[in-house]
Image: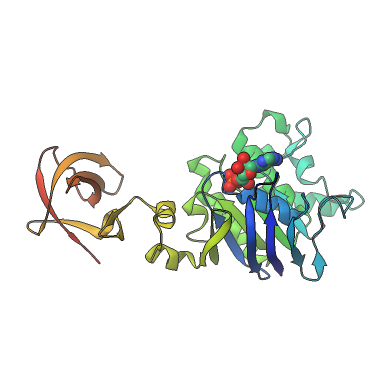
Amino acid sequence: MLQVKHLSFGYTKKYILKDINFTIKSGENIAIIGESGSGKSTLLKLIFGEYDLEQGQIFWKNTEILGPKNNLVVGYDFMKYVTQEFDLMPYTTVENNIGKYLSRFYPEEKQKRTNELLKVVELEAFANVKVKTLSGGQKQRVALARALAKQPEIILLDEPFSHIDNFKKQSLRRSIFRYLKNNSISCLVATHDKNDVLGFADEMMVLNNKTIIAKDKPQNLYKAPKLPLIASFFEEFNVINNKIYYTHELKIVDDSDLKATVKQSYFDGNSWLVEVLYNNQHIFISHHNSLHKGDIIYFTLLK
Ligand code: ADP
Ligand code: MG
């Protein structure tokens, strides 16, 4: 398993991460979330051994992950890292990119494995296409397949579906995470997309102000977000009397003590998001239809 102990790091004198501690068990899927610039990518790079730690230690099983000062070639066979930049070979085909690290002395096995991975990332039709002609999302899928080619024990994914369009995203996500679980590959995913987390992560960690401020099952953090920052990762919310309410935790009713004026209604797919003014505060309530600006409404708190 992965152990991160008292990790601290800064690119300059200023700390980016301070006293980070966590473990990931074999086959576990852990998400790391946080605002842009909170240090998610930096943490993945440190775990991959790209930089020297200021303080702390990182272990995969009994192997200590060392930075460039103590390790000539960055990276280990048991660990793969899919960066936000992909690092592919542009003038080479999809198939050859995926098979890059597979031994050419076993051509049949190499082909079989490549085909299997082409299927996981749904790129069978593009096997012989040069990577430079692909879209950003397709390149991201090639990078994922290549990282999996030599079956790592742990994979670090940096916003792995960020370039993939909504048409493909859901099925690809399920395909990748199912593959990792079925093969007991540990996984650390940095993301700002709740859909990468909710149905898949065993636990999620919230990175804020240099450190991990929460670590729990996604269900628990969703149901009882202790901070607006955590709630905001999941959904639109309101703070009323110092309590956090998602928009569906407020209900428009015929009568109540809470009276507000409608400002605007936004179509939100399955429901409407109604913006109302209550005690000079803008409140957002999920409702089954749209309401007119200026209407007076009453609402209750559902918890
Ligand atoms: P995230 O992935 O959560 O968006 P990053 O880890 O990329 O955050 O960045 C964390 C902080 O470190 C940011 O303030 C960013 O500007 C800074 N940073 C990232 N990479 C470098 C670098 N190579 N040199 C100096 N500062 C960096
Ligand atoms: Mg990042």
The image shows residue 256, relative to residue 216, as above or below, that is above
In the rendered image, residue 46, in percent from the top left (x then y), is placed at 72, 53
Q: Is residue 35 left or right of residue 125?
A: left
Q: Residue at x 65, y 50 (%)?
A: 15
Residue at 76 percent of width and 53 percent of height: 149
Q: Is residue 65 visible?
A: yes
Q: Does residue 185 appear in the picture of this structure?
A: no
Q: Quadrant of residue 143?
A: top right
The x, y position of residue 83, in whole percent, is: 68, 45
**Nearest the eye: 81 or 232:** 232
Residue 163 shown left or right of residue 301 in the figure: right
Query: Quarter for ligand 1?
Result: top right
Quadrant of the snapshot with the C terminus: bottom left
Assign the N terminus to one quadrant of the image.
Answer: bottom right
Question: Could you say which quadrant of the image residue 124 lies in?
Answer: top right
In the depicted structure, whether residue 127 falls above or below residue 222: above
